[in-house]
Image (cartoon, helix red, strand yellow):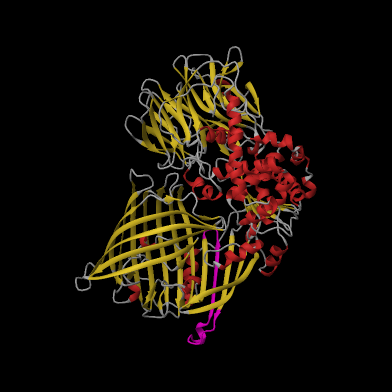
Amino acid sequence: MNLLFGNIPTRKSSARFALLLLIVFAPPLQGQKLYSLQTKRMNLVSYDAAASYVLPHVGRCFENAISFHEKLFGYQCEGQIAVLLNDFNDFGNGAAGVVPQNLVSLGMSPISMSFETLPSNERFNWIMNHELVHIVSLDQAAGRDRFFRSIFFGKVSPKHEQPLSMIYSYYTAPRTYSTRWYREGLAVFIETWMAGGLGRALGSYDEMVFRTMVRDSAFFYDPIGLESEGTKVDFQVGANAYLYGTRFMTYLVYTYGPAKFMEWIRRVDGSEAHYAAQFEKVYGRPMDEEWETWIAFEHTWQNMNLDSIRTTSVTPVRPITHQVLGSVSRSILDSSAGVLYAGVNYPGQVAHLAAISLKDGNVRPICEVTGGALYDVTSLAYDPVSSTLFYTTNNNSWRNLESYNLKTGKRGQIMHEGRVGDIVFRPEDRSLWGIRHFNGIATIVRIPPPHNEWKQVHSFPYGKVLFDIDISPDGKNLSGTLTDERGRQQLVEFSIDSLLSGNAVMTSLFDFENSVPASFVYAPRENAMYGTSYFTGVSNVYRYDRATKEMDIVTNSESGFFRPIPYGTDSLIVFAFSGKGFVPSLVANRKQTNVGAITFLGNSTIVRYPELQEWNVGSPARVPFDSLTTFDGAYSPMSHVSLVSAYPMAEGYKDAVAAGWRFNFADRLYLNTIDVDVSYSSHSYLKSDERLHVATRYRGWGWTVTAAYNGADFYDLFGPVKTGRKGYWAKVEKRSTLLFNEPEILESHLSVAGYGGLERLPEAQNIAASFDRMYTISGGIQYKFLRKSLGGVEDEKGTTWYAHVDNRFVRSQVFTLLDGGFDIGIPLPLGHSSIWLRSAAGTSFGGRSDPFANFYFGGFGNNYVDYRDSKRYRETGSFPGLAIDGVGGGNFGKGMVEWVAPPIRFRRFGLPKLYASFIHCSAFLSGIVTNADRSALRASALSAGVQADVRLVAFSSLDATFSVGYAIASESGNRTDEVMASLRIQ
């Protein structure tokens, strides 16, 4: 029986099989059209012709920045640096990598201004300045690096399937093996002075973080603890690398000067390859010792600032709740219910909407917010008549709009990927207003009921962005913060009637210069607005009188106040910053005549070393880009595929060792990659036709084409799992994403493959093949909706399921195998702990006596050295306690109950070049039945086991996991056990 293909003829020649492959996968592989703008040093590629308006400006920013970096670092740009311009996210971002080739990725959207965590000028100027620091500092080569690049034909990218590549990678680009705080800290420090001091090294948020840590006697991480715990469990997670790194770099320059700093970070002849060794060479002491000195200095510095703030009366704070909420969204006050609604995200819980009682401080979760943003979680609005909360999800990509009815508990998505945020509700017509980001442009939009479609109201020219909008109580005016390409910040106001009639004339209420007027809202019972600003260096509440047009300061905070809401006649609800996040609090609404000032470490640094003023790179507008342009036209990725590296490798084949070379090819954007492995086994017990091993793999645009002859694998050297096989095979596979609403993902795959010269089944190493040739047509779908909270090490809740069909054409028979699985995770009150129920079942058609028509199970599935998932006991084909392929059948049913314990994190356990980050334990109980419909062949087994995983980090950026496990199994009254030990290279 063939469920998919009916009576397809089964006597197939290779030619017929190739024809079938062509039919299944027609039309041929095609990619999306790309556009390229090139200079001698840059290859700028964009996905969409609509982005063409900004390409020359991006090119000028690149040329402006790279010229400065070449001079500062003494760097010589060899060949082109690829730059990919995209619109994949609603907020601008960047990324950079140097192995095997130099590549920068730029997001077009406006950057997030939440809490002024990213002070900057024009977005592309800022991102390019920053990302090219990464390129230059990590790519710059000394003589030894250049030698290894020559013998390996380029810089080697570490490949987990060929772990020797990690050694070669270090020798070709050693500075890539550095901590994130080092890479980001030096980039932020340099970017700040390239912009004339507008950046995080002179940022108010950074000062606030460390000032508050000192005030609260919070723990300061050392370099190892920062990477192993500090960037994982704190509500700011990875942002701590930027904060600590930037602060340490600023301290170093303040203390020792910029010349010594540049001597440390340059990679030149005579310098040490590893960044920590070079630090000790330059500064004359280990980095850990200097880090401790910095922490002591930071306490002294921030106590000085706290004393300065306290020279005037500090605003008393009365917490509404003692629960620290981590990151918070804009909040909504329901005065009649005495409740504050907000989006929150803190360690141990996934991001969610919460109701905060103003009476007793109780924090009640309402519903989950999938894809919560790092700092402001979600954009939130409220319709008091229908008691409906509106909020955004997928906030790190293209935002969706969802609603939750507080009366009925009904929730749902009402607009998919509308890309609208900063939403606010207008009661007069029950419409939502918001800001949409698309193609680098910010647009005011109106979303009328039923709120499933946006209407364009006004689009700002590139460089101008409106955010933090609010609507006046009478529904006549819309206010917000307007930023421009120079970093200038204004509080502005529009007439809604004028906006709706096409007249977008605005009124500038107050010019805050380079300090963001944040979260200004209209007061419901007075002609005033309240918001916050770091105008004096500390984030305090300001009151704007709309009648007198005066701006008054209302608070004097030690740490910082944010997102104020007028409450009663003489109070304000604010979110007070603490070392663990934001705390909703009450403060007095009282005009201040004077507030304490602080001293910025960055400002003191440039005063001490005025030569930093020479780092100001100036405006990119002066770059003569037209004369630098060498190409403007279509970009064909395949025509740019070239050899990027080649290096010796080792593989395992059966019990033999094979030596050979790997060749890696790729285009400049890695949209198409080709790997070719060629090795040879000289062992005499192998037949002559089994000594040569060849494998090749192409990946691009969702397609994977692989072929192998006597396939070998590095990890077969260690066992017990063997993936290498005698014979030859070829496979074409297409993977597609049917739903991408991260973290909700639905994917499909379809493949055609042919095998020849088989001794063993391709998926079962201990089962002999009944015939040496097989053709397959396979397909399936997989759904995942998995989440974890801040500080988690793996998914803690959600569901996943899959369905798969495999049609195997062997001799004159067709064997169809169907299987599927379903997992559900339930979080426990104990943080980062959950119970998982896992199940799978399958059946085959076409003659179960043949090995090709059966499923096989057994073992943990881990090699002693491996690169696949550490917890392989969860996979369908695993069954710890039994031998590999120890049980099989034509059908099966399988279930598992698993308890995942909370991780135990280490603040410091190891050395800078090798340390442990955490240990994670789990326990499981599983059962399986095969051939359930045939009592004579029926088999069943039970298994119980435990596993512990220790995450290791080597050379600052290479992750590995050491796992140990034990399981005992019972099959037909016979008990067997299994001990597993495995080192996973990731």
Question: Residue 636: x, y in percent?
Answer: 65, 58
| 78, 910: nearer the viewer | 910
Question: Residue 843: x, y in percent?
Answer: 30, 66
Number of labels in the image equals 0
**Does the image show residue 927?**
yes
Quarter of the rendering containing residue 553: top right
Q: Is residue 139 magenta?
A: no
| 826, 144: nearer the viewer | 144
- x 33%, y 63%: residue: 819
**Does the image show residue 462?**
no
Is 332 left, or right, of 623 in this rendering?
left
The vertical placement of 893 against 34, above or below, is below
Question: Residue 534: x, y in percent?
Answer: 60, 28
Q: Is residue 688 magenta?
A: yes
> Which span is picked out in magenta?
680-702
Q: Residue furthest left?
A: 935
Quarter of the rendering containing residue 756: bottom left
Q: Residue furthest top?
A: 548
Is 796 left, or right, of 496 in this rendering?
left
| 19, 541: nearer the viewer | 541
Question: Residue 176: x, y in percent?
Answer: 62, 56
The vertical placement of 541 against 160, above or below, is above
Q: Quadrant of the N terminus?
A: bottom left
